[in-house]
Structures are given as C-alpha cells and as structure tokens.
Amino acid sequence: MATKETPKITVHWLEKSRKLELPYEIKTYKREKTMLAPPELKTVHPLGKAPVITIGDRVMAESASITEYLCDHFAGPTSTLVPQKWKDGCEGQLEGETEEWMRYRYYMHYCEGSLMTHMTLRFIPWSIKRAPTPFFLRPITSRIAAQLNSFVEPGLATHFGFLEEQLKTAPEGGPYLCGAHLTGADILMSYPLLIAQIPQDGHSPLNKEAYPKLWEYAELLKESPGNKRAIEKIVAIGGEYNPNFA
C-alpha cells in the first residue's frame, strides 16, 4: 500500500467510466452531449481520453497499463490482486505458470482488446435510435440501427457465452474469472460487464437468463468494497453517480 513517501495519486475520472481501489483523489470531467470526453482532458494527456492517472509528475493512460503498474507498486506480498505466477518448483519454466496467472494475463488484454470493442459498437445503434430525428426519417434511422445490431449481437453473444463457460471452469470454482480471489483483471472486466447490464430498448445486452453465471459475476463486482468506496467518493464530489448512458 501507499506510504508517506508515495506521491499523490490523482484519478482524472470521466463520468461513466472505471474506478480504482487505492487511496487517491478524484478530478471529475463531464461527458459532452455526444458522450465524448471534454477537451480539458487533453491538458492532462494528449489523447484526451480517460482513465488517466497522475502519480507525482508521471501521467499514465490505458486501463490495463495503469492497473498493472498499480499492482506492481501497491499490491503487497499478501495481496491476491496478482495471482501466483509459477507452480511450485516450476519457476522460469515454459508452461510452468499457474492457471490463475495465465487467466490474469489474458484478461488484462482481452478486456480492452476484444470485449470493450463489441460493447462500444453495441451502443452505436442504440444512440442512433435515441437521437432526435424528424419523424419522416425515423424509419430510415431505425432500419440502420437494426442492421448494425444484426452485425454486433452475434459477436456479443459469442463473448458472453465464452465468459459464461470460463466462469464455470474457473480455478477453485471461482467465483472470479481467475479463481477464488478478486484480481486486477476482474477490476478491468467490471466496466464492460456493468454497462452491459444497462437496459437498451427494454432489455440489457447481458441477459440474466441466458448468462446466469456472468450476471452473478457482474453483480459480485458491483458489490465489491472498492467499487462502493469509489461511488461514495464520486457522490461526495459531484452529488450523484449515474452509470447509465442516458
């Protein structure tokens, strides 16, 4: 954990995005009507995107990179945020890594590299349907949204089905993707799964009946102490916490 010598950690938080489980300060930014980040974030990082953290004079972006860096420096020897890497007696050997660690490494990259892309695409047709449009154009925009959905939905179903099976085969029976303990990879996975629970046109992309274990996993992440503390901080600063893209 952080010590008195640790530089101050500031999270530059764009509403409706990820949170962090560490002693930190939050600087909040409101999304524009287009749901894009405001231009002020470019004064923190040239890409103008979140999440971004500052530790002393160092500015860091990209969720997985931030998570790995923080785990390297703040996960103590008894922490389970990073699983044990090597099987006993297999240090440095090819295929000597534990199943827990291999999953941890995989999901650190899978979250942004695969799942989040599909989640972002899923919100495009929804946004098209909700956009203010003259009544005579609505049949056209609705047809475009439906066609986009027909492209996105099979991919999401593939990912959700994959994750459902991964949870069924998690080491030690789970309940987390990497095993019995919450890891940095689970923290990353929380964001796309929690927004997948947001209703769109009367139903959520993540269906509780079709993917019961994945829904239960998302609920578990939502109820984690770190998530609840982050929400309390956000409410204290901004007066409310609204995760919905509405």
Image: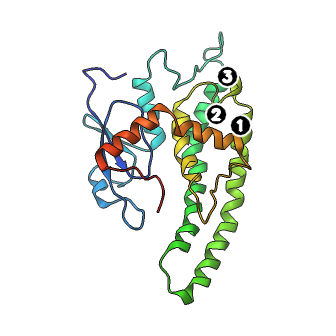
Determine the image quadrant of residue 218.
top right
**Residue 6, percent from left and from top:** 28, 25
Residue at (39, 67) in percent of width and height:
33
| Near-viewer residue (106 or 159) | 159
**Kind of element beneath mark 1:** helix
Taking the spot 70% from the left edge, 39% from the top edge, the residue there is: 213
Can residue 81 be seen here? The reply is yes
Do the residues under discs 1 and 2 have CB atoms within 8 angstroms? Answer: yes
Q: Name the residue under label 2.
A: 177
Query: Given this view, does label 3 or label 1 mark the residue nearer the observer?
Result: 1
For label 3, count other residues whose C-alpha is less than 10 Å away and answer few (under 14), some (14-19) or many (20+).
few
Horizontal side of 91 relative to 72 (left or right) equals right
Identify residue type, mark 1: Gln
Q: Relative to 10, is 158 on the left or the right?
A: right
Q: How crowded is mark 2: few (under 14 residues within 10 Å), some or many (20 or more)?
A: many
CA separation in Å, label 3 and label 1: 23 Å
Q: Is residue 45 visible?
A: no
**Which residue position holds label 3?**
94
Residue tagged by mark 1? 166
Q: Earlier in the sequence, mark 3 or mark 2?
A: 3
Residue 45 image label:
none
- Mark 3 and 2 residues: CB-CB less than 8 Å, in contact? no
What residue lies at 29% left-to-right and 45% top-to-bottom?
Answer: 237
Kind of residue at badge 2: Leu
The picture places residue 85, in percent across and down from the top left corner, at 59, 21
